[in-house]
Image (tube, helix red, strand yellow):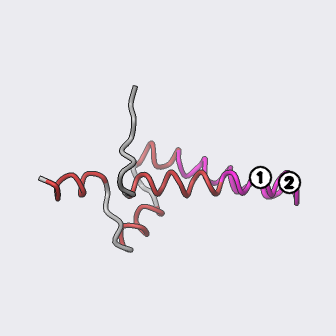
Amino acid sequence: MYLAKTDVWYLERIIWLIAGVVVLTGVILGFFVHRYWLVLPLLVGVNLLIFAFTGFCPMAIFLHKMGVKSITELSCEQK
């Protein structure tokens, strides 16, 4: 069983957090406000597929420019 590190907030963990929040927000708004809000989780899913196949993630680029470090960068700093 794989357990991710939870002692520090690294880039990949923040991306999963943002994706989860956006998906849940879209589903809740789609259920209570209007069904067109369900496009939001659809876009997150498409972005996750694009990342899986190409490695391109706009949120990762944005967060990295904001100074958030990936788990690889953090592990290299500790050595």
Number of the label disc, if any, that sits on residue 38: 1
Residues under labels 1 and 2: Cα distance?
Answer: 6 Å
Magenta span: 23-48
Q: Quadrant of the N terminus?
A: top left
Indicate left or right for 33 with 78 as reference.
right
State yes or no: discs 1 and 2 in contact (Cβ < 8 Å).
yes
Say what amino acid the circle numbered 1 marks: Leu
Where does label 2 land, which residue?
35
Vertical arrangement, residue 65 with respect to residue 23, above or below:
below
Horizontal and vertical percent for residue 24? 69, 51
> Residue at left 60%, top 51%?
20
Indicate left or right for 59 with 23 as reference.
left
Horizontal and vertical percent for residue 43? 64, 54
Indicate left or right for 63 with 32 as reference.
left
Horizontal and vertical percent for residue 42? 68, 50
Vertical arrangement, residue 28 with respect to residue 4, above or below:
below
> Residue at left 36%, top 51%?
7
Rendered image quadrant of residue 18: bottom right
Horizontal and vertical percent for residue 72? 25, 52
Residue 32 magenta-drawn?
yes
> Residue at left 17%, top 59%?
77
Say what amino acid the circle numbered 2 marks: Arg
The crowding category of the residue bearing disc 1, from other C-alpha atoms within 10 Å (few below 14, some 14 to 19, many at least 20), is some
Going by the picture, which residue comes out furthest to the front?
7
Task: Return the residue nearer the eye: 77 or 19.
Answer: 77
Number of the label disc, if any, that sits on residue 6: none
Which secondary structure lies at badge 1? helix
Which secondary structure lies at badge 2? helix
Q: Main secondary structure of the magenta part?
A: helix
